Image (cartoon, grey):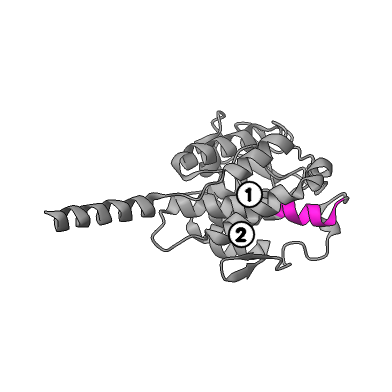
Amino acid sequence: MQKTVAILIFITLGFSLQAQNVDHSEWTSILKKYVSENGQVDYKNLKKDRKLLTDYISHLDKNTPKDNWEKEDKLAYWINAYNALTVDLILQNYPIKSIKDIKNPWEQRLWKLGNTWYNLDEIEHDILRKMNEPRIHFAIVCASYSCPKLQNEAFVASKLDIQLTTATKTFLADKNRNELSENSLKISKIFDWFSKDFKQNGTVIDFINQYSDINISKTAKVNYKDYNWALND
């Protein structure tokens, strides 16, 4: 009897440990304090509190994704990591007017997560894009005016689908970044640069129609807006 109970406790504990997510509450606290509702970042004051961010990055370093994690857990981890590291890159170089003022911003291997040193390019292209979730492009932020707004809460596995859908709809509805009508589109360069990601189940217009209130014609004329790399502050 005791042996049976011990086995059941071990199995239950094992499932419990496997189901645990990384705690991203530190990141949410930073975002709530230093990011406005429209995604503007108070880099000046966050730089004074940079230890909050480096502590969160250290937390990510100690809790890297395992093979048995659910896809949602992995996505939430790497989306939050990308955004936190981008903010950290800006803080390391602030004050600047654009992320492009930094030499090779996406190629600098500055952060150790687990046993690996990463740059932003690797996280975006070698990890996130390979997870076949095109909505990540509206969740990860390049610290620029034309990119999607930085959400002021962390992405978490338990509500990731809702968060990604909301981020996508919000970006598409933002007339500063996308102008949509039934027969004409003037859309973000993101849809051009990563068109392959949006064509997994049809055309780019098919993708946009899933998340827009406007019913866009399949033959609508498509143009792309100039990308504004000014800092999102």
Q: CA distance from mark 2 to mark 1?
A: 8 Å
Q: Is residue 101 visible?
A: yes
Left or right of residue 58: residue 12: left
Q: Earlier in the sequence, mark 2 or mark 1?
A: 2
Quadrant in which the C terminus is drawn: top right
Give the residue number, with chain letter if any, for mark 2: 124
Q: Are marks 2 and 1 in contact (CB under 8 Å)?
A: yes
Q: Position of residue 47 (x, y in %)?
A: 80, 47
* Residue drawn at point x = 25 percent, y = 52 percent: 9
Q: Up-down: is 106 above or below 163?
A: below
Task: For label 1, count other residues whose C-alpha is less than 10 Å away and answer few (under 14), some (14-19) or many (20+).
Answer: many
| Amino acid identity at mark 2 | Glu
Q: Is residue 168 magenta?
A: no
Helix, strand or loop at mark 2: helix
Helix, strand or loop at mark 1: loop
Query: Residue 140 — which label?
Result: 1
Range of residues picked out in magenta: 86-94
